[in-house]
Image: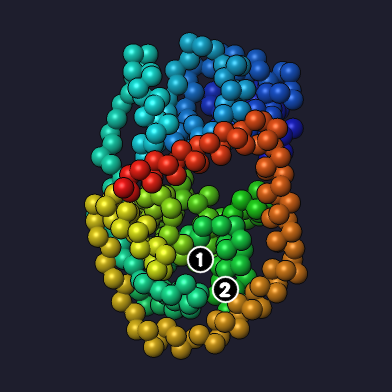
Amino acid sequence: MDMITQAQALMQRPHVVIATPGRIKVLLEQNPDIPSVFSKTKFLVLDEADRVLDVGFEDELSAIFQYLPKDRQTLLFSATMTDNLQTLLEVSANKAYFYEQYEGMKTVESLKQQYVFVPQNVKDVYLLHVLSKMEDMGVRSAIIFVSTCRSCHLLSLLLEELEQPAVGLHSHKSQALRLSALHRFKSGQTPVLLATDVASRGLDIPTVDLVINYDIPRYARDYVHRVGRTARAGRGGLAVSFVTQNDVDLIHEIETVVGKQLEKFECKENDVLAELSKVYKARRVAKMKMLDDGFEQKAEDRKAQKLKTLSEKGLLKEKTKKRRRSKTTSAEESK
């Protein structure tokens, strides 16, 4: 939806407004009639508060708060307790009411969690094997999580070359393309969704029977959010994680946090590697296609623009300091 249409809708003074912080900030600053719409706000709800309170949203939230009345009630919802939320809890203990129904980062009992130990250079071969068994396993649709937009784009080209229907969902795509991909997946037109962690929250699609962690997430909370896309509302589901020699420590940490040991996903290595040549050939073609469509250059331009924006906001140094503190804490905990 374009901003003019959104501004016109806001001028009708709706009772409920659902928006991202960035879009609200732009509308408030570019249209002098919009601030009055929010002048009598009674409730401010921050969903996925652990992400929204991250330093990346500081500028947007600061801009929005100045237009909201101080006597509003603010409600924060989060499935995971982070350092930011814990700090907020401590400093606001005498000023705010906190309702906590938090039992740690647990996964539901109806979710079967498995792993397959694979060499890094044949992950694609194992992925094709698992996807080819979807019908035999009774899987209606699957979400494959990867760590980067580049991997997501490359895998989508690879599966296209292998004639495996799939759509990609990542932040380098336009909003229109993301919505189109999501619609095709939700409607059942395409049974496989390739996605970064942009899809690890907020998706509730009953037909998702399988979640594949093609790349193991760095943090256990991201694993919990990912596998939570299946086995929802009492239904069953399967999560399969591809573990390379570099992921062993991450998997052990995840198992410790969720309080459950992952089971081994059974597959015959000879059957898997039978498609090795086919997959390697398709991967070479996919890489050439990615060069032709200019994805790498667009990614570099996007990264440069992001760094420039963070620098202009004064957030670049702050994020670097935060990353260093996180590494220091992790190093100290491992001693």
Q: Amino acid at mark 1?
A: Val
Kind of residue indicated by mark 2 = Leu
- Residue shown at 43% from the left, 75% from the top: 119
- C-alpha span from label 2 to label 1: 10 Å
Give above or below for 325 relative to 205: above
Q: Quadrant of residue 161?
A: bottom right
Q: Classify the position of the N terminus by image quarter.
A: top right
Q: Observer-nearest residue: 93 or 41? A: 93
Label 1: which residue? 192
Q: What numbered label is drawn on residue 159?
A: 2
On the rendered structure, is 261 left or right of 80? left
In x, y percent, where is residue 132? Answer: 45, 78
**In what element is the residue under mark 1?**
strand
Q: Secondary structure at mark 2?
A: helix
Left/right of residue 78 with respect to residue 7 in the rendered view: left
Q: Residues within 10 Å of mark 2 (few under 14, many from 20)?
A: many
Q: Are marks 2 and 1 in contact (CB under 8 Å)?
A: yes
Compared with residue 64, is residue 212 higher up or lower down, i.e. above or below? below
Work out whether 330 lies above or below 5: below
Q: Is residue 189 visible?
A: no
Residue 3: x and y in percent read 72, 34
> Which comes sooner in the sequence, label 2 or label 1?
2
Residue positioned 54% across, 33% down in the render: 55
Give the x, y percent position of residue 262. 28, 63
Q: Residue at x 33, y 44 (%)?
A: 333
Which mark lies nearer to you, 2 or 1? Answer: 2
From the viewer's perspective, is residue 188 above or below residue 47? below
